[in-house]
Image (cartoon, helix red, strand yellow):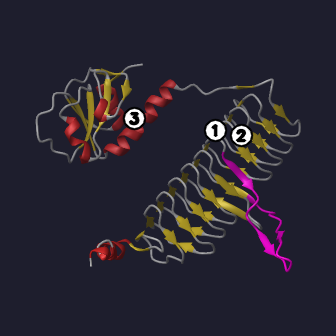
Amino acid sequence: MELTAKYIADHLNGELVGDPDIKVSAPARIESGKPGNIVFLGNLKYEEYLYKSKASVVILNKSFVPKRELNTTVIKVDDAYQAIASLLELFTNLKKSRKKGRSFFSKISWRSKIGKGCYIGNGVTIERGAKIGDGVQIYPNCYVGDDVVIADNTILYSGVKIYKGCVIGKSCIIHSNVVIGADGFGFVPMEDGSYKKIPQTGNVVIEDFCEIGANSTIDRASIGSTIIRKGVKIDNLVQIAHNVEIGENSVMAAQCGVSGSVKIGKNCMIGGQVGISGHISIADGTKIGAQAGIMSTIKKEGLSYLGSPAMLAKDYLKAYAIFRNLHKK
């Protein structure tokens, strides 16, 4: 599959400089671009590779001014990162054909409802009362429990397990070995030192256009719902505890742990290995650096935090400049 530079520029609403008829067959990293590749420069750390690249086409920000003449076709865009995301989606959609059909080796309850144009792979189990929307893709060895609802065009990759009563919105992507709806970690300490289990009677609700990374877990609520709002993106190996609510379009990197009953606002950005204590709230637009520990409610919107216990990023950097040199005194 080959696309011309003009076709790509039109698709990205970009400004073309160079040969409109030159063809590319695949995107590549700017460090390793070859003839027939299209690359992009979004981070100036990689600018040196721009002048060495043998790629046929390069995507640049309109605001970028090269230090030397470029011997390649250029597409100038407002935001190179957004452009490459659209480009990768374009290449993926051109290559990908959605699967259809039900495997003979799947087990589907006659009391479930399966929409049109679905794919159900080998070893899939769908229990009674489940409702599967149109165009849903369920890859091999997935489990869909009683009364689960999965809306149109959602993808479940191999090994996903969705427990009873959970709800998944449309056009979600759930990666391999995700577990949705396992019991929350609820126990009451007894006088004899043992622990009595608190029944977890709620469910998990994941709204439209969410993506959940491989091996992540989202626990069902003790009462009510654990809620992942529209557009949330969760990386691999993340633990979301019972009764958590994550606001629209928030993103969370790998290995985060969110304790029970936490309320995270919309448009938050949470770095890898962040730990968040239970029963607190985090304001809209909050940014939390990797390995931070959030132990109390964040009320003001749009602030950045670092450290454990976390503090405002600007305060942490001032403190770090001092304590990193304490051993020298």
- Identify which amino acid the numbered label 2 is placed on: Gly
Residue position for label 2: 133
Quadrant into which the N terminus falls: top left
Q: Going by the image, does 88 lie left or right of 211? A: left
Residue closest to the eye, 273 or 61:
273
Q: Which numbered disc, 2 or 3, marks the residue closer to the eye?
A: 3
Magenta segment: does it hold 295?
no
The x, y position of residue 211, in whole percent, is 57, 47
Q: Tag 2: Cα neighbours inside 10 Å, few (<14), some, or many (≥20)?
A: many
Identified at 46% across, 35% down, the residue is 89
- Identify which amino acid the numbered label 3 is placed on: Leu
Could you tell me how far apart the alpha carbons at marks 2 and 3 are, in whole angstroms?
28 Å
Could you tell me how far apart the alpha carbons at marks 1 and 2 are, in whole angstroms?
7 Å
The x, y position of residue 68, in whole percent, is 11, 37
- Kindly indicate whether the residue at mark 2 contacts the one at mark 1 (C-beta within 8 angstroms): yes
Is 38 located above or below residue 194 in the figure?
above
Residue closest to the eye, 183 or 227:
183
Residue position for label 1: 153
- In the rendered structure, which disc, 1 or 2, sits on the residue that comes first in sequence? 2
Residue position for label 3: 87
- Give the residues drawn in magenta, as a range: 178-203
